[in-house]
Image: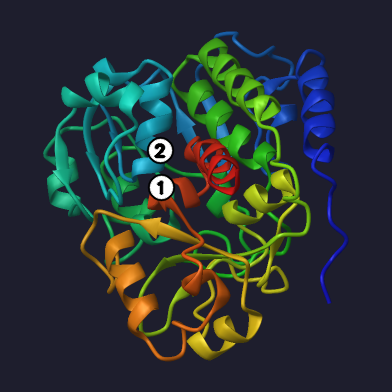
Amino acid sequence: MHPIRTRPGGPRLLRALALAAVAAFAVGACSAPDTQTTDPSAAPGSDTHPVSLENCGRTVTVETPPQRVVGLNQGTTEILLSLGLADRMVGTATWTDPIRDDLADANAGVERLADNYASLETVLATEPDFVAASFAPTLAEGGSGTFEDYAKVGVPAYLAHTDCAKAVQGQGAGDGARNEKLTMNDIHTDIRELALIMGESPAGEDLVASLDERLDAVEPPEGAEGTTVAFWFANSEAPYMAGGVGAPQIMADELGLTNVFDDRKDEWPQISWEAVAAENPDYLVIGDLTRDSQTAESAEAKIEFLTSNPVTREMDAVRKERFILLAGADMNPSIRTVDGIEKLAAGLA
């Protein structure tokens, strides 16, 4: 049974109310309940260092605005670059896609430490004074080092609120369950917290406002309401399809679409092709990834699989070639979620 849906105009009204609240409350108040600054009365944009944030059940303290930062995932890197902080970045790692076009020049001067996880030793060789990750497995054993590893050498480590908000906080939750649906406000929290840590709160508020302006400009295409979609990120054997709690659900809600797996509480559950075919969505939203980690990463490989596999080739979306391509980063919670909404609206039109 599908949950009650927000009409396409609903998120816009909520954003307007949220922007009004920003004028009256502090950055700490605007953040998630587990987030506080050392000066809760400080207004957005004020210099609050030293800063302490509750982050995934840990306290992250930053004495002065960091000057040597490593973005351990593409999402956090693109936020930092969007805040105008390329000159304070000494490395990036873990990418699924090329950089956004408007950030390419800024990113060109930042060293790519690794396309996937950078080792702890590689990160520490840059002599960072702050590291930031988008996903819990990045700050875990087998990733780029743990919170404890960085704490031992005095480097504050931050994990995005969007991942801290999962059901299992800070324990390598990965693509696991969420108790509540992700919202654009969660992405705003990532922006505001990173901006606060970096001493650039005004830039954070400007970035949040620009994302909301772009969302308000998106018009759901005529007839989009109720159109069924499925979001395929990667893997052809047991595909990762979007459940009803992550960034793709934000896209679906914004445009009035029905995600056929919106009853799943995992962000990216692995679902059999027989189950996908049984749902027979009107459109397949396909991740076009440039990394080399899973099977069927690129859109080309995905479409080749869909059109040749006997289970999937008879689906309406496959026979009618109703494919909408998004970058993998567009399907993760970040500033790229707005890119995904814009591309999805254009594809439906």
List x then y, in percent, for residue 206: 57, 14
Q: Secondary structure at mark 2?
A: helix
Of marks 2 and 1, the one in the foreground? 1
Label 2 sits on residue: 76
Q: Earlier in the sequence, mark 2 or mark 1?
A: 2
Q: Quick check: can you spot residue 56?
A: no
Q: Quick check: can you spot residue 326?
A: yes
Image-based side of 261 in relation to 332, left or right = right
**Circle 2: residue type:** Thr
The alpha-carbon separation of the residues under discs 2 and 1 comes to 11 Å
**Residue at 50% over, 35% down:** 335
List x then y, in percent, for residue 60: 49, 38
Above or below residue 259? Residue 6 is above
Q: Secondary structure at mark 1?
A: helix
Instruction: Categorize mark 1 by other alpha carbons within 10 Å: few (<14), some (14-19), many (20+).
Output: many
Above or below residue 246? Residue 190 is above
**Residue at 57% over, 75% down:** 316
Image-based side of 5 in relation to 128, left or right = right
What label sits on residue 329 in the rendered view?
A: 1
**Circle 1: residue type:** Ala
Quadrant of the rendered image containing residue 193:
top right
Quadrant of the rendered image containing residue 187:
top right
Residue sitting farthest toward the right: 4
Quadrant of the rendered image containing residue 29:
top right
